[in-house]
Amino acid sequence: MHVILVTMGSAGDLFPFLWIGRALRARGHRVDFLGPEQHALYVDAAGLTFHGLPADPAVLDHPDLWHPTRGLAVVWEATRPAMAQLPSVVAALDTGKDTVLLVHPLALPEADLCRLDRPGLKVAATWLAPSNLPTVHDPLLLGPWPVPTWVPHGVRRWLWRSLAARFIDPVALPGLNAAREARGLPRVRSLIDYIRTVPDLSLALFPAWFAGPVPDWPQPLHQSGFPLYDPDPDAAPGPALRAFLDAGAPPVVFTPGTGNRQAGRYFEAATQAVTQLGLRAIFLTPHREQLPGSLPSTICWQDYVPLKALLPHVAALVHHGGIGTTAEALRAGTPQLVVPLAHDQFDNAARVVALGAGASLHARRVTPQRMGEALSSIVGTSALARRCAEIASFSRRGGEANDICHQLETLVQRD
């Protein structure tokens, strides 16, 4: 089998594909990896054949990137230059036999166009987080706004379509339909409705205990555990970090995500909150410029530390709610304070709270006082610690990469 993996975005989008790609290669399949140019080192280290796609890092400074409703449009526009190359790149790589495109959800429109060159091509979608799969069933959040359980499904469907018609379709459909019309294909009226019809197989890369299946998810669908990929599985805290950890009580780790370069207010509030509470902290970000110029001795800055190596040594994790970070904290049994900004983060935060694994604070409501109150509710709370340990006991089972490989192998055998 020949599998062409297509992803975009940050390391959180990349790692699940590396997890699957390595398993496919171990089973003897040919694997080609298409992704943003800046991820070449990760893919090369995983031993996979990499084909870089253009990516403009300036998108990280776009003022609406982390907006609750406008953020998706920013991501869509930023990824289209790379996705426009997908049909020609895939046509050049396709061996013509038993080929599967395994793609990020936002690559599904271009994956559909790839079928024009070879109608027998199979397309599989990887849904990285529950909110990637629009549904009218509970729990339902439209951005940061929860929909009450008593709202009928018909009204929920209307709400979804209204939100998409205002914030998504005006950005996505003009270019998508121009590309389709140029190839003699009919126009698309709703991006959300359309992409559900594209894949021959859907892979939900999160366990049922985190988000159970609902009737309106696309079919056929296979649900896995979290794809917890470690780029450096033997990593350990370096000497400076080890010395900091040994110097006092377990600290609280703060990370707004590796791709967030707009977290100055977040770190300022965190600095004041931990200082007032007498807590130690680790600030985890590759962008030092967004931290206060001078940090007290009780706060340690690190540009990157694998969470698997760090979380066993900390009191809590404060993070943005990316699905990969959320899964790592669940695996480690670490209490979480989720501070969501956009995209899938609000839904992930709500599920963490529903599981009893932590608390949530909307990023736009962050102040030192509110962050301090939220931290007080999770740090040193014995009941929360017991619940997190219970979740960790079954979260560590993780995903089964070979089972996903089997699903893809079965897919190529279908008529």
Image (cartoon, rainbow, N blue to C red):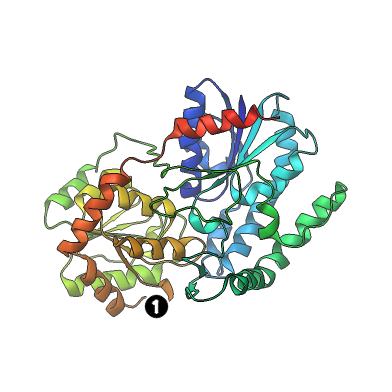
Tell me the quarter of the picture where residue 167 sits: bottom right
Q: In this view, does 292 lie to the left or right of 34?
A: left
Q: Let me know if residue 41 appears in the view.
A: no
Q: Which amino acid does label 1 sit on?
A: Arg
Rate crowding at label 1 as few (under 14), some (14 to 19) or many (20 or more) other CA atoms within 10 Å.
few
* Viewer-side residue, 116 vs 394: 394
Percent x, y of residue 322: 43, 56
Percent x, y of residue 187: 82, 57
What residue appears at the point 53 percent right and 59 percent down from the top-left corner? 60
What residue appears at the point 80 percent right and 51 percent down from the top-left corner? 179
Q: How many numbered badges does the structure rendering display?
A: 1
* Viewer-side residue, 376 vs 11: 376
Q: Is residue 122 left or right of residue 339?
A: right
- Determine whether the residue tagged by mark 1 lies in a helix, strand or loop: helix
Q: Quadrant of the C terminus?
A: top right
Q: In which quarter of the image is the N terminus?
A: top right
Q: Let me know if residue 341 appears in the view.
A: yes
Residue linked to disc 1: 365
